[in-house]
Image: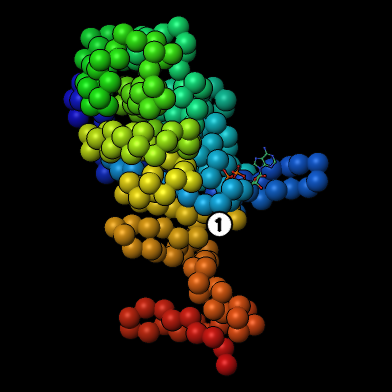
Amino acid sequence: MPTNTPTTTTSGAGPAAACRGVVRIYSSPTGEVHALKGVDVTVPPGRMTAITGPSGSGKSSLLRILAAQDTPTAGHAEVAGHALTGLSARGLRALRRRHIGYVFARPTDNLLRHLTATEHLAMAARLRHVPRPVAREQGEQLLELLGITTRAHHLPGQMSGGEQQRLAFAQAVIGSPALVIADEPTGELDTATTGDLLAAVGELTRAGTTVLMATHDPLAADAADQVLHLRSGTVAHEVRDGRRLAVIDTDGRLQLPDDALAALAATGTTRVVVETTPDGVHVRRAT
Ligand code: ADP
């Protein structure tokens, strides 16, 4: 892929990022917290993947691991084919710089008050070692793609919250990292601005960027190509092509959807019969 395309992603056919059996246990004064309990996730390249789930379900823990800001207690995680486990702090930093862009929830956390939009992009490109002419061209293309060309020489304080978040995405994408991670990027925006930002992020993914975002926002989840729903530190279900799919992890564990769980609980049983039939596997209440 040429280096001056506005946005690119991992080369080859592999996933942009993946986790296998990822466990994250925190130590706290009151004991251990099992935040991730064996998470398997595949983030396809050039798509928008949303991570949803109630507060405390493990979204931030998973994002931090895939952003190379934290390492799993056990299991395997990789970005652009590079393992994130067993790396030194320096190795993680290098991997972050080259392969991962990050967008925080609060526009002001993403930007520096004294730099214009163009200066932000130039700085981000320098950190990714993008040659200056390529950076300039890519920067202009990104501002256009994200609809903020007229803000090129404005400071963050002269932009709306939505424009600031678009610039944060442009900054995360310049230099074509394999993965752009966004933690609740629409959390501080109103509904109309959220819609505009999601449309702009959709343009980025169509141009090849891989976006992984944690969100509580149904609009953001609806805009995603794939939704991973976490429940108590595991992937409860995925939504792909409008279909809700239960996930079987590498150890063969399957989380029942909430309605199925409630139906079983109503019968007072926690034991089921599992039957393999020509069309699949059936889970039946034991009578
Ligand atoms: P979410 O992003 O879905 O709200 P988190 O990943 O932040 O979930 O948290 C998952 C669980 O891990 C929660 O029970 C939270 O309290 C706990 N947790 C997160 N970070 C830490 C930490 N640094 N130390 C101890 N417990 C933590």
Question: Residue at horizontal 60%, vertical 56%?
Answer: 232
**Quadrant in the picture for the N terminus:** top left
Report whether residue 141 is seen.
yes
- Specify whether residue 11 is in view: no
Coloring scheme used? rainbow
Residue 259 on image: x %, y %? 50, 72
Near mark 1 (Cα within 10 A), the count class, few <14, some 14-19 or many ≥20, is: some
| Side of 157 where 176 appears, left or right | left
* Residue 79 coordinates in the image, percent (x, y): 42, 37
Rendering quarter of residue 278: bottom left
- Front in this rendered view, residue 104 or 125: 104
Location of mark 1 (residue): 231
**Of the pair 37 and 158, the residue shown nearer to us:** 158
Residue 283 in percent (x, y) is at 48, 80
Closer-to-camera residue (198/275): 198
Question: SS class of the residue under badge 1?
Answer: strand
The residue under the point 44% across, 65% down is 246
Residue 211 x %, y %: 36, 38
Q: Is residue 228 above or below residue 122?
A: below
Amino acid marked by disc 1: Arg
Label 1 beta carbon less than 8 Å to ligand 1: no
Closer to us: 235 or 170: 170
Residue sitting at x 41%, y 46%: 50
- Quadrant containing the C terminus is bottom right
Judge left or right: residue 34 versus residue 238. Answer: right
x 64%, y 82%: residue: 268
Q: Quadrant of ligand 1?
A: top right
